[in-house]
Image (cartoon, coloured by chain):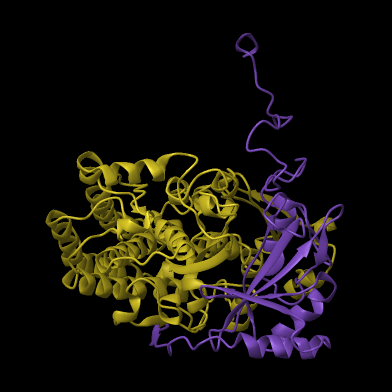
Chain colours: A purple, B yellow
Amino acid sequence: MSEAVVSTHTPFADLAVETITAGLEGALGLATGSLKRSSFRDNHRIQVDPPCLGRALLALREAGMDLLIDLAAADYLGYPDAEHRYGVWYILENTSTGTRIMVRTWADDPSPSLPSAFDIWRGSDWMEREVYDLLGIEFTGHPDLRRILMPDEFAGHPLRKDYPLSGMGERHHFVPLARDES
Amino acid sequence: MPLKLADAIAAPDVEERECLWTLNFGPQHPATHTTLRLVLNLDGEVILKATPDIGFLHSGFEKLGEHLDFNQYVTIVDRMNYISPVANEIAWHQTVESLLGIDLTPRCKMIRVIFAELMRIHDHLLCCGAAALDLGAFTAFLYAFNQRELINEINEWASGQRFHPSYTRVGGLQRDVDDAWIGKVRGFLDGFIAAHNDVNKLLNRNRIFLDRCRGVGVLSKEEAINRSATGPVARASGVQRDLRRLRPYLAYDAIDFDVVCAEEGDCLARYLVRMEEMLESWKIVKWAIDNLPGGPVNAEIDGRMVLPNQLSVYRSIEGLIHHFELNMTNRKWKPPVEELYTATESPNGELGFHIVSDGGPCAWRVRTRPPSFIHFSLFPFLAEGHAVGDVAAILGSLNIIAAELDR
């Protein structure tokens, strides 16, 4: 009979987002202060350009941010002062210290694509498939990038802002029957 | 000469081998409980490859979140994990309140803590009961469901709805609880320990149940972190991570409780962690109901964020104007043009909401971090190399809720 053991945590220590950003700038070979940082409430964000995203994520993983909490994206078509169409975020946590940061990056039309984090965190597998399915952002290097929530033959990406809430037709194999046909 | 399992797994072309068998498990199968499908490539009884196929219940909740305001969307959030609905509502409104900068009253915080912990008991009772049911131990399931019924009554007394209470509102609650509700909670607490003991006695010495759980679906600590597992699934693998301790929200920083962990990482450890967590939740509810602060449940209405109560709408002009302002489609809230992620420790794991706000009353984008979705992606890893019969044990121990999985 295995025993469930009881343990206690130390309270969450304050974030050291400056240290993380400085370390990341060093790892990417950028000048100090060149990565944009922002904060809102308890969220601390670091903005990383898509070309160095893969290296940045790997550097953060090696610096101890071992848990990928969430990977998701939004369509900023028509959003106030938006510079890019798609924003993608990675929420990372260091499980030994509790430090949490958000890495922000972006993608643009006509063929939005980003490097896959599959080799860094296995947990990114389905999260990337979901972003691909619902927003149409491709993750290069993902071994199995298929639709996950929508049916395989579905056209369009429902969470894009140019996809309406309703009125994009029926699925072809769910043809509605008229009363006299049934 | 029987096929060696190690050779078979190492072979890259699993689908193409003629001796193998493909089995469709679901979408309608008693052990999936809800609608999800698995395609299993079998060598005899051994699973060589499991491919989950999900999306049968996809109903565009996140798209709806872009078209419903902060109070309306709570009814949708309810239906994500319908096994612990109030836990979802608390997570959603916590993000909204954090975005708007609303401070909750002490009484509201404590009532939300009570509901969050009752929901944890509710969820774990279903998970442990249904896991036992799938493995042939029917009786424990009925004992567990008896207790769940009492929690449904507590929901109903507070909100009027048993299953989808939609009980929280921006900055407060739908309405305050009364003494009869407190009596109901106390009544539940009095009877729960005996029922918990019954389930324990029925399962912890049940040879069939133990043999089918022990050593099945082992998740190591490194894999649990690497594959983004959270909540009881991660804690059963030795990851000592509980958001109630790590980043205390509501009133959890004032409450004494233990974080339950195990080290084996198998189905039995996940079952034991859930059973033990129910006792910790019982302790929290007991403490919270004894220390329930008085005062209002809704935050100050001066901020024009919280719906006024019926009396002030009918009896005062300020209340009426305020109610009008919060319900007209061109008024409502004016959140900052910002984005925010906050998370709670839901019964199933980390449940977070990410709101992107463009300053309007509806969110620009609502992202749910659904624990079931992330835990189900573990399934192929856990199931490969096990027998078909172990699928039920592994699915039961992960507690996959398809409505949250597909959203």
Residue B79 x %, y %: 45, 48
Quadrant in the picture for residue A47: bottom right
Residue B357 x %, y %: 57, 56
Front position in the image: A90 or B258: A90
| Left or right relative to B173: residue B272 | right
Quadrant in the picture for residue B50: bottom right
Quadrant containing the N terminus of chain B in the rendered view: bottom right
Residue B210 x %, y %: 43, 72
Q: Is residue B4 above or below residue B407?
A: below
Give me the residue at 86% from left, 54% from top.
A111
Mark yes or no: residue B171 visible.
Answer: no
| Left or right relative to B99: residue A128 | right
Quadrant in the picture for residue A102: bottom right
Q: How many marks?
A: 0
Front position in the image: B24 or B76: B76
Give me the residue at 74% from left, 58% from top.
A86
Front position in the image: B186 or A1: B186
In the rendered image, the residue lying farthest to the front is: B317
In the rendered image, the residue lying farthest to the top is: A180
Q: Is residue A147 above or below residue A169?
A: below
Residue B129 x %, y %: 37, 60
Mark yes or no: residue B119 visible.
Answer: yes
